[in-house]
Image (cartoon, grey):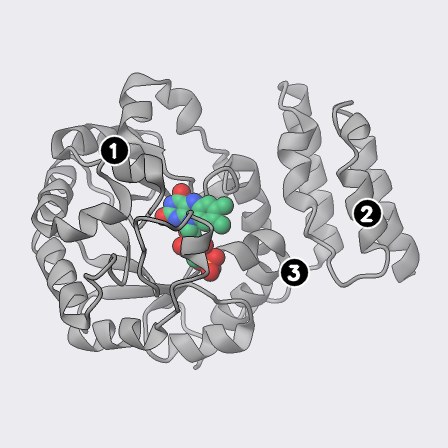
Amino acid sequence: MSSSPEKILAVAPMMAWTDTHCRVLHRLFSPHALLFTEMITTGAILNGSPERLLRMHPSESPVACQIGGNDPAELAKAAQLVEAAGFKEVNLNVGCPSEAVRLGRFGACLMVHPKLVSEAVQRMRDRVTIPVTVKCRLGIDQHDSESFLQAFVGTVHEGGCQTFYVHARKAILKGLSPAQNRNIPPLHPQRVYNLKRHFPDLTIVLNGGVTDVQTAKAHLDHVDGIMVGRAAYHNPRFVGELESCIFGTSPTDELGTFEAYLEYIDAQLMTGTRLFDMSKHLIGMFGGHRGARRYRRLLSDATRRNSNDAAVVREAVGYICRTAA
Ligand SMILES: Cc1cc2nc3c(=O)[nH]c(=O)nc-3n(C[C@H](O)[C@H](O)[C@H](O)COP(=O)(O)O)c2cc1C
């Protein structure tokens, strides 16, 4: 794979993880990645407080906002608010297998309702100018053939969706927790490659199990982009490594990046943000370095972190600096 600006590097939507602070950190490692919010339901956007839910720091952009719902009219209204909040893309969740989401009849169970998804995409597109995209699985339960996935993508494309993020495993809707549904059904990246071959004009981004640069490069020979979830969260430096590999950007200096995030923490503390809401995203940062265990232990210390004093973060990174010196 040659470095190409057309390839997509995306950091996956992850509930309770990819909040605004996490995205600021990932952006420091990667100027080009497309970052995703956590899934936000239409109910929360339309009946809750959209200003708070759709809050974004200016440095994060470009960010795709992922929404969850099944009512095309509500999805269209929510998409409008998403665009007004400054997001560059609105993405519909058709992959979440959780019990609550299944009972709400959205997420992965929508894979067996492609016409509804297509209509929702069309209604959203009527209301916004930003791209409307879909994140889905290979299938659900017994609906897991390649022809099923092709029919789903083909129908949703008729509604105007050009870009699909495909988690390369199916979801099993009863009997597995969301975490098990991210590990137990086997990954089939070849099926995502085949999907791209079947729809060469669509943008197909592969998600699932990308934990090293070599695997990412191998996928990029077959699809338009990769989306990385857990590996990006547990080791934010990995996003920087992918950035360098895909876009040819000079590698980031992790201590410099850490300092930049500390400046962000200092500024946010002044506005009343809790330290731990920001420092928790740093816990995986220096894995593999000497001193990383003491660093993690200090950052996780409940008494210190609740003090809302960034000194604890500076002290923690001192363990890394001292051992590296
Ligand atoms: C804690 C957590 C929360 C997640 N929340 C969402 C979500 O809100 N929306 C979504 O589409 N996928 C969600 N996912 C799934 C990821 O986006 C991704 O599809 C999955 O983790 C597989 O990618 P990976 O192997 O690179 O982690 C979540 C995953 C994790 C670990």
Q: Quadrant of the C terminus?
A: bottom right
Residue 47: x and y, percent?
29, 17
Disc 3 to disc 1, how far (Cα)?
42 Å
Quadrant in which residue 218 is drawn: bottom left
Please rate how many residues cluster around mark 1, counting C-alpha atoms within 10 Å: few if below 14, some from 14 to 19, many from 20. Answer: few
Q: Secondary structure at mark 1?
A: loop
Image quadrant assignment for residue 53:
top left
Q: Quadrant of residue 50?
A: top left
Of badges 3 and 2, nearer the viewer stands: 2
Residue type marked 3: Thr
Residue 73 in the image: above or below residue 323? above
User: Mark 2 = which residue?
Assistant: 295
Mark earlier in primary sequence (3, 1): 1
Distance in Å between CA atoms under marks 2 and 1: 41 Å
Which residue sits at x=54%, y=49%? 27
Q: Quadrant of the N terminus?
A: bottom left
Q: Cα distance, mark 3 to mark 2?
A: 20 Å
Q: Residue at x 48, y 70 (%)?
A: 246
Q: Position of residue 137 (x, y in %)?
A: 29, 58
Q: Which residue is mark 3?
A: 252
From this viewpoint, is residue 256 visible? yes
Give the residue at mark 1.
Answer: 104
Mark 3 secondary-structure assignment? loop
Q: Earlier in the sequence, mark 2 or mark 1?
A: 1
Q: Residue at x 27, y 44 (%)?
A: 107
In the displayed structure, does residue 203 sit left or right of residue 288? left
Residue at figure coordinates x 79%, y 34% from the top left? 301
The residue lying toward the viewer, choosing from 202 and 73, is: 73
Badge 1 residue CB within 8 Å of ligand 1: no
Q: Nearer the viewer, mark 2 or mark 1?
A: 1
